[in-house]
Image (cartoon, rainbow, N blue to C red):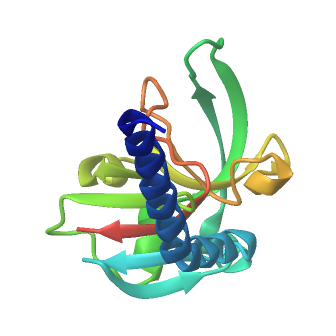
């Protein structure tokens, strides 16, 4: 075996071990996020510290609203849908978290994706929602082929690029 083949085999082995270690170390976090998603728990944080957890029925009790939103996705025609959800600002207020003197809310998904939403957009009436129903059906989990159980929807986002599927938490900064 020549030296180039040895280097290649060693490099592949090191990459394999590194990937395996990363998966093992991250498994606990992924499992915790998956459990939150499956149990439909949504976490509210303030500056990184958890201040409240809500399940689906608690969120619905805050005051659900039916609204129209258009999803725009690359390669597809825009699609109008009827959603049911709660204004994100109302969830924070229900948790006793003031929106004053903050600049953004970061919403995180079960898969680690995160989107920062300017506080002015959150305060805007009829704009930033945590949705759980689309066209009369629950959003469903990833395993069910859905995008929920929660999805952040910003109605006035012209390209739907800051929407968050599989949303599990929101942190005000």
Q: Classify residue 166 as left or right of residue 116.
A: right
Q: Classify residue 66 as left or right of residue 170.
A: right
Q: Point out the image quarter for the C terminus.
A: bottom left
The residue depicted at 69 percent of the width and 70 percent of the height is 60
Q: Quadrant of residue 64?
A: bottom right
Residue 94, how many percent across, how many down? 47, 80
Give the total of numbered labels: 0
Q: Is residue 140 visible?
A: no
The residue depicted at 35 percent of the width and 69 percent of the height is 171
Image vertical order of residue 113 relative to residue 154, above or below? below
Residue 67, how many percent across, how many down? 64, 42
The residue depicted at 40 percent of the width and 88 percent of the height is 51
Image vertical order of residue 4 relative to residue 168, above or below? above
Residue 159, how many percent across, how many down? 45, 24
Question: Could you say which is closer to the camera, residue 113 or residue 154?
Answer: 113
Q: Is residue 132 visible?
A: yes
Question: Could you say which is closer to the camera, residue 4 or residue 137?
Answer: 4
Question: Could you say which is closer to the camera, residue 14 or residue 136?
Answer: 14
Q: Classify residue 137 as left or right of residue 107.
A: right
The residue depicted at 61 percent of the width and 56 percent of the height is 166
Question: Could you say which is closer to the camera, residue 22 or residue 85?
Answer: 22
Residue 118, how many percent across, how many down? 26, 49
| Residue lying furthest left | 101
């Amino acid at each position: 075996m020549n030296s180039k083949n040895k280097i290649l085999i060693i490099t592949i082995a090191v990459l394999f071990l590194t990937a395996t270690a990363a998966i093992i170390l991250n498994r606990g976090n992924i499992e915790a996020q998956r459990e939150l998603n499956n149990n439909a728990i949504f976490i509210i944080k303030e500056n990184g510290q958890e201040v409240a957890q809500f399940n689906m029925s608690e969120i619905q009790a805050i005051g659900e609203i039916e609204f129209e939103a258009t999803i725009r996705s690359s390669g597809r025609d825009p699609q109008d849908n009827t959603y049911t959800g709660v204004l994100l600002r109302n969830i924070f207020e229900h948790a006793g978290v003031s929106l004053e003197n903050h600049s953004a809310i970061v919403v995180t998904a079960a898969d680690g994706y995160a989107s920062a939403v300017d506080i002015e957009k959150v305060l805007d009436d009829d704009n930033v929602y945590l949705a759980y129903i689309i066209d009369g059906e629950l959003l469903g989990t990833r395993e069910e082929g859905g995008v929920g159980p929660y999805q952040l929807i910003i109605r006035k986002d012209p390209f739907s690029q800051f929407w968050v599927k599989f949303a599990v938490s929101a942190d005000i900064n």
